[in-house]
Image (cartoon, grey):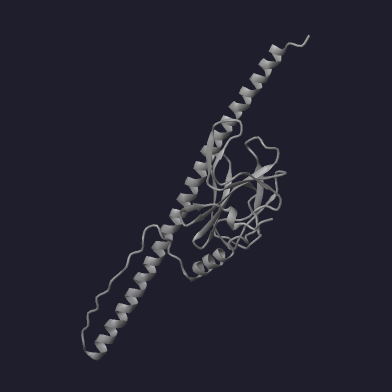
Amino acid sequence: MVSYARISDKLKKRTRIKCAYRALFSFNCTIKFAQLKNSISVIIRRELEERRKAEAAEMARRRREADALEKETSTNIGVATTTKKTVTKKAATSISLNAKDVALSSSFSTNKGKLPWPVDNGYVSIPYGAYSIPGTSLRGDNPGLTIATPSVGATVKAVFDGEVLSVFNLGDGTMAVTISHGKYFTTYSNISGITVSKGSNVQTGQVIGRTAADDEGGAGGKIDFLLMIEMKNVNPSPWLRRS
């Protein structure tokens, strides 16, 4: 005779296990997303500071040249002149861009809605922003798109021309690549077999690595894809080409 009470107990136990797994999944995702976002922020902030220093050095060089030219001119005509100079400081949250960066930023911006996906075959398993864990009351916040692929080792490609800003480890063996496109930055996390290094120039569609295993229990691979405009996270979906 079938013991419905025993079956009921088993179902309840399975439900509790599923809920516990989902809670753990949510907790792990929350920590990883926070680590990833913080790591990228540090990298971009460092780049911002380096660009400012380079610009300050260039401005100082130009001032010295202007002062030397002014002194030479004044000496030649026998007239001493004093010129008051005013230096305008840029806001700390704005990235100083050279002509190449400005052109790259403009080109990136005009391609909104036309950028290729970072993988050829995949689907969004966790969308950008707030999301809920099915079967629980738990919620998380994704700073980008989590894209699942049918298998581990799918090629990951740069979505636009740019320069590799950093190749870094999140501390748990997870590798990521951040690419600068002027004031825009894309990050590809949870990838293996990385084929680029810091300072490498990449082109649209160039392979930069392969998807690593889905460490949250999925059968295939996955990547976390993030897009930032200077220090601000934005939803990558509107920027990617609709399939």
- Residue 146 placement, left or right of 62: right
Measured along the vertical axis of the image, is residue 133 above or below residue 241? above
User: From the image, which quarter does the C terminus lie in?
Assistant: bottom right
Q: Position of residue 231 (x, y in %)?
A: 45, 54
Measured along the vertical axis of the image, is residue 42 above or below residue 31? below
Residue 190 in sight from this viewpoint: no
At 70% from the left and 53% from the top, the residue drawn is 120
Q: Position of residue 76 (x, y in %)?
A: 26, 89
- Relative depth, front residue between 165 and 161: 161
- Relative depth, front residue between 195 and 34: 34
Measured along the vertical axis of the image, is residue 243 above or below residue 3? below
Quarter of the rendering containing residue 109: bottom right
Quarter of the rendering containing residue 17: top right
Q: Residue furthest bottom?
A: 77
Q: Position of residue 16 (x, y in %)?
A: 61, 22
Quarter of the rendering containing residue 198: bottom right
At 44% from the left and 54% from the top, the residue drawn is 46
At 36% from the left and 63% from the top, the residue drawn is 90
At 65% from the left and 55% from the top, the residue drawn is 117
